[in-house]
Image: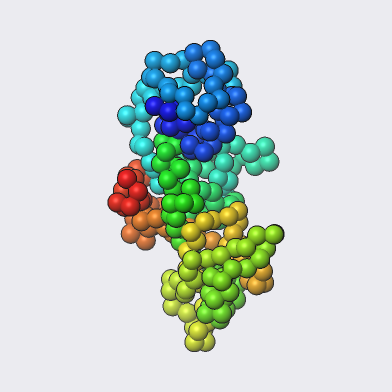
Amino acid sequence: MRINAFLAKLGLGSRRKVEELVLSGRVKINGSTITDLSFQVNESDSILFDGKPVAKEDGTENRPKIIAFNKPPGFLTSHEDKHHENTIFTILPELFQKYNYAGRLDLDSRGLILLSFDGNFIQKVTHPKNKIDKEYIISLKQPVSWKKIAEEFMLGVREGGETLRALSVKPANVFPEKTAPGFTSYLSIVLKEGKKRQIRRMCKTKDLVVLDLYRIRIGKLDLRNFDLLEGKYKEVTEEQVLGNLHP
């Protein structure tokens, strides 16, 4: 198996991330530093990353390949952070401490996160070419004329030197509202390629104050049809997330 696919399968990261590790000379196979991405690896090979043995797949058959986690607010999507001790891995069991996550949610946001030890799955969900959409429900401090906001967000807004664009924007209809026709405090926003804090940044350009940001769906997996309490996790399959579009 090619070195990037093999290391991704062992949970060292997505294929793209693993390629960066290999090209930077951090991987040794049978005592030799390998920087050739076409290098073929066997199960019997000795593999070192930063001088430490890379654990083989022994025992992974007893672990869920993919889990869905409903992140509460107040926890970082990170394995560790020197400025903040509360990460999602302080909630998750030891079994999942080395899992990688497909897409972050910022500290104050909540909702669906996918985790896996299979770097190939992480790559499928996160790589822009696969166009896996994600849906968010946001709560705003004040009702807005949603059609105007939708038009501007779908056309694209400039913030921080980037163009930020939504695939769709519409009322979320999560609560009955006593607002004027065409106005709502709850929006459903779908993104194809989520950039860092994208929705909050988009809202900032329109002086919209976000009270709550909740990721409700990744690909086909929708928390509205999936019983998963906040702070809890559940095993899921690749087909539940990707359907039959990405074998």
Q: Residue at x 32, y 45 (%)?
A: 247
5 shown above or below 131: above
Residue that lies at the very extreme toward the bottom in this rendered image: 181
Looking at the picture, how far across and down is residue 244, in whole percent? Answer: 29, 51
Q: Residue at x 61, y 65 (%)?
A: 202
Which quadrant is home to the N terminus?
top left
Looking at the picture, how far across and down is residue 131, in whole percent? Answer: 44, 55
Closest to the observer, 229 or 36 = 36
Closest to the observer, 227 or 148 = 148
Looking at the picture, how far across and down is residue 95, in whole percent? Answer: 43, 32
Q: Is residue 225 visible?
A: yes
Number of dots carrying numbers: 0
38 shown above or below 195: above
Residue that lies at the very extreme toward the top in this rendered image: 31
Q: Residue at x 68, y 41 (%)?
A: 83
Question: Is 135 situated left or right of 160 in this image?
Answer: left
Closest to the observer, 73 or 161 = 161
The type of colouring in the image is rainbow
Q: Is residue 97 visible?
A: no
Looking at the picture, how far across and down is residue 173, in whole percent? Answer: 43, 74
